[in-house]
């Protein structure tokens, strides 16, 4: 058992599982990096809204797949459905926030629960269908790396690295947006467009996290690593990098463990590891952790 | 910069716009249907320090935000050095209220000052060694060079205010808009800000500064824009800052240029 876990961790347990674990790690990296900016922009709950709002789209994509080809398990189609309905959810949150007196958290709660209930109803309907393949659909809620194919893992890894590259290029711009959006706008930076870009990157992470972490727990992989990273450093660049590292580590360990015990949900395992890293950081982190509390602050 | 603007304007300026650093005509701004500023006309002179003064809710911050395009205007024209203000963003530096940001942000004082250089650095390029040197020079101008590497949350309120001022200096602008830079700062910071204001004026820059302390306004600024939902008085401090004008703006009797009136928002 131990030897097998070590093999999995070191990517020696066969090509397939190595690619799946590496793809998961890339996803964790992307979630941690994007999460840093999302956290500092105070939009963490938006990722929860996107995740839940994506479910009806995924279910509809599954039904479309069944109608067109007889099987609903086309990863590309499911991603498309997730992105489309996730986008709709985000736009709806923005519309509610901008055009009503509801604050953003109420808007998020409204959209999240509404979309999710539509998704759950569609899922129950799918389960009554005779068509094959619906067994894997529940895994989309909590993640199941074991059901991932090689191509899917490659797609996830490639998209995740693209997200990380975009964040690396825009670190300075996103940092300005997160720290002082008013000042950025006064200088002529396109604040709305920057916010949109950040939302799109977040949307991409949620969508490709579909099979690895699942739609319900993706918020944890976006939120926990940056909070943990903030405990270790006072600089934005280092925080984003460290957060990506924590996310990658959590996803790597979680995915490897779930290959070993395929009946446990991958998403849950990954988030448990991320939670452990957060506890450790809160206890030991020099910048914000409990040990740092004792340091005196100047007036 | 000045020469560039004179000799290579992209388009000839539309004639009626004033050439002055800031010319505002008929500016009206409303929050949710409620007008905050009505028909504001104001022209800022070249190389001047202007105090923007008025009671709570007089629209002082709103005035700055409307000029910066942060607050949509219902009516009015705003020009900056002869062009519509939208095209002159690069010439305007902004010092927001200190309370407008979260100082727990993972950034050092130098990181924040470097933000003033971002427009010149451009999209997707990193902050280089040369930019860090420029930012450090701006920190030195406000007496904060020793705190460059300090996380901004570990600075005192006055030091944070000076970091914001240094960030505006890094923009190397010609018109400076400052929202209550003197609010709640220590004596050292107050002296540093005044020194910076005077050196800006010496270099021909114009500064508009929202200021809440009527007592010190005549000492620090030679021009006044007295607001109370509209322009109550504007012009040279000595002529505009009359007892009658102050009484009209604040609704209470005050000695001209005298007693400090509580903090305005």
Image (cartoon, helix red, strand yellow):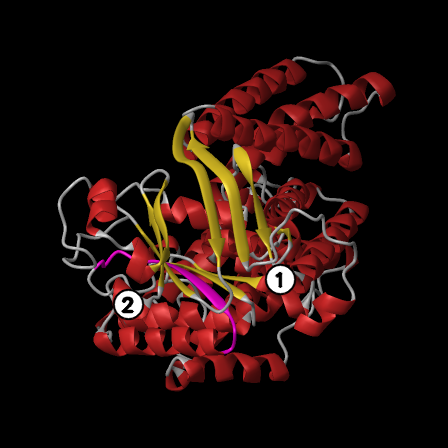
* Gap in angstroms between the C-alphas marked 1 and 2: 28 Å
Residue A82 seen in this snapshot:
yes
Q: In which chain is the residue bearing label 2?
A: B
Say which residue appears at 17% left-offset and 53% top-offset: B261
Q: With B151 as the anchor, is A251 left or right in this view?
A: right
In the displayed structure, B133 sits above or below A203; it is below
The residue stretch that appears in magenta: B203-214
Residue B193 placement (x, y as % from top left): 35, 73
Say which residue appears at 62% left-offset and 42% top-offset: A206
Of residues A9 and B208, the one nearer the viewer is: B208
Of residues B184 and B211, the one nearer the viewer is: B211
Q: Which residue matches tag 2?
A: B157
Residue A267 sits in quarter: top right
Q: Residue furthest right?
A: A69
Verify whether residue A279 appears in magenta: no
Q: Which mark is residue B90?
A: 1
Q: Looking at the rendering, in which quadrant would you find the N terminus of chain B?
A: bottom right
């Amino acid at each position: 058992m131990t030897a097998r876990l070590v093999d999995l961790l070191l990517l020696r347990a066969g090509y397939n599982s190595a690619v799946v674990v590496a793809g998961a790690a890339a996803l964790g990296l992307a979630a941690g990096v994007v999460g840093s900016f999302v956290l500092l922009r105070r939009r963490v709950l938006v990722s929860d809204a996107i995740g839940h709002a994506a479910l009806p789209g995924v279910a509809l994509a599954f039904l479309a797949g069944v109608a067109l080809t007889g099987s609903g398990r086309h990863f590309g189609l499911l991603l498309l459905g997730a992105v489309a309905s996730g986008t709709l959810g985000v736009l709806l949150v923005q519309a509610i926030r901008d055009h009503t007196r509801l604050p953003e958290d109420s808007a998020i709660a409204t959209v999240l629960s509404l979309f999710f209930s539509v998704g759950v109803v569609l899922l129950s309907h799918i389960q009554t269908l005779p068509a094959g393949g619906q067994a894997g659909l529940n895994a989309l809620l909590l993640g199941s790396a074991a059901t991932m194919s090689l191509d899917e893992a490659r797609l996830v890894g490639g998209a995740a690295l693209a997200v990380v590259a975009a964040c690396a290029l825009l670190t300075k711009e996103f940092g300005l947006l997160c720290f002082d959006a008013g000042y950025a706008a006064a200088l002529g930076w396109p604040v709305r467009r920057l916010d949109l870009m950040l939302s799109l990157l977040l949307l991409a992470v949620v969508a490709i996290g579909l099979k690895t972490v699942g739609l319900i727990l993706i918020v944890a992989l976006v939120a926990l690593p940056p909070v943990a990273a903030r405990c270790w450093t006072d600089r934005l660049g280092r925080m984003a990098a460290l957060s990506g590292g924590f996310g990658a580590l959590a996803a790597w360990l979680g995915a490897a463990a779930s290959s070993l015990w395929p009946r446990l949900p991958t998403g849950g395992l990954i988030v448990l590891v991320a939670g452990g890293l957060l506890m450790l950081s809160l206890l030991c982190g020099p910048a914000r952790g409990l040990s740092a509390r004792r340091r005196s602050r100047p007036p | 910069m000045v020469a560039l603007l004179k000799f290579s304007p992209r388009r000839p300026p539309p004639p009626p716009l004033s050439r002055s650093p800031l010319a505002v005509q008929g500016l009206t701004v409303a929050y949710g249907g409620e007008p905050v500023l009505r028909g504001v006309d104001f022209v800022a002179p070249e190389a001047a320090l202007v105090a923007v003064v008025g009671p709570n809710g007089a629209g002082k911050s709103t005035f700055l935000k409307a000029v910066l395009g942060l607050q949509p205007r219902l009516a009015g024209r705003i020009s900056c050095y002869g062009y519509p203000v939208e095209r002159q963003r690069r010439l305007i530096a902004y010092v927001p209220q200190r309370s407008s940001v979260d100082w727990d942000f993972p950034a050092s004082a130098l990181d924040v000052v470097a933000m003033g250089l971002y427009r010149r650095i451009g999209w997707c390029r990193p902050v280089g060694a040369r930019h860090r040197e420029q930012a450090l020079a701006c920190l030195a101008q406000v007496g904060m060079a020793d705190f460059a590497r300090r996380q901004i949350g570990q600075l005192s309120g006055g030091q944070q205010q000076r970091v914001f001022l240094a960030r505006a200096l890094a923009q190397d602008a010609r018109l400076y808009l400052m929202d209550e830079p003197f609010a709640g700062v220590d004596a050292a910071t107050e002296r540093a800000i005044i020194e910076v204001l005077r050196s800006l004026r010496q270099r021909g820059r114009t500064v508009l500064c929202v200021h809440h302390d009527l007592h010190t306004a005549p000492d620090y600024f030679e021009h006044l824009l007295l607001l109370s939902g509209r322009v109550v008085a504007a012009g040279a401090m000595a002529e505009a800052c009359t007892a009658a004008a102050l009484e009209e703006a604040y609704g209470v009797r005050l000695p001209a240029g005298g007693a400090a009136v509580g903090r305005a928002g």
